[in-house]
Image (cartoon, rainbow, N blue to C red):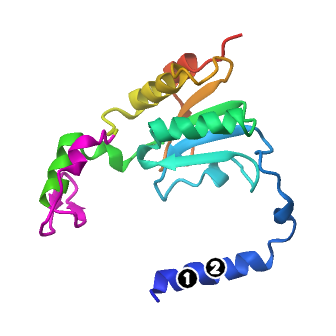
Amino acid sequence: MSAILQEVLDANQRYAATFGEKARLPMPPARRFAILTCMDARLDPAKFAGLSEGDAHVIRNAGGRASDDAIRSLVISYKLLGTREWFVIHHTDCGMETFTDSIMRKLLRQSLEPAQFDGTSWKDVGSGPGSVEGDFIDWLCIEDRYQSVVDDVLRIRNHPLVPKTIPIYGFVYDVTTGRLVEVPEAMRAGAAAS
């Protein structure tokens, strides 16, 4: 058994030992909102948004992007579980800003092994085989973090399954201060229809 697996299982034992009333939490989120944000380990939505278990839905992916799957989750969150407000939160110093679709595709064609970032570019240090399957994926890279928030809010807002009555808020989380920075253009784009 790996050390990481053992650490996770031990932590789960301690957590489960005091689970108590959490067993009675209802399925719908108590505070009726959802957050779409990045999977970056430096972001802890429970802390930066003041969440407890059962409060909100948190959807995470690379970059916090409004992918088809993220929108699917938001629609389910609203339609079946009652969320009424959504947040799109990207962040500073995001790894999705360090490459482009063409770089990712090139790296995957060379090798499926982990690549290394030297501070300026990605280098494939693995040996083949690679795969061309990455050529068929939109990696949703980020060139401008503030514009990407606007783009994602608009993508959600304009989706045919998203009611115009849901407010969609746009923010950038600053990894150096812990603060949420409002993206005014995203806030305007995500405003709910009256």
Residue 83 figure quarter: top right
Residue 51, horizontal then vertical, whole percent: 72, 51
What residue is disc 1 on?
7
Quarter of the image for residue 125 reads bottom left
Q: Is residue 118 magenta?
A: yes
Question: Measuring 54% from the left and 34% from the top, which residue is drawn there?
Answer: 171
Q: Residues within 10 Å of mark 2 (few under 14, many from 20)?
A: few
Residue 148: name its quadrant. Answer: top left
Residue for badge 2: 11
Which stretch did the figure color magenta?
A: 111-139
**Residue 180 at least partly seen:** no
Residue 101 seen anywhere in this rendered image of the structure: yes
Question: Do labels 2 and 1 touch, CB within 8 Å?
Answer: yes
Q: Quadrant of the C terminus?
A: top right
Q: Amino acid at mark 1?
A: Glu
Q: Position of residue 35 (x, y in %)?
A: 61, 41
In percent of the image, x 52 and y 44: which residue is there? 37
Disc ID at residue 44: none
Q: Is residue 131 magenta?
A: yes
Residue 189 in the image: state x and y as whole percent. 53, 17
Could you say whether the residue bearing mark 1 is in a helix, strand or loop?
A: helix
Q: Residue at x 61, y 33 (%)?
A: 75
Image location (x, y in percent) of residue 103: 18, 46
Q: Residues within 10 Å of mark 1 (few under 14, many from 20)?
A: few
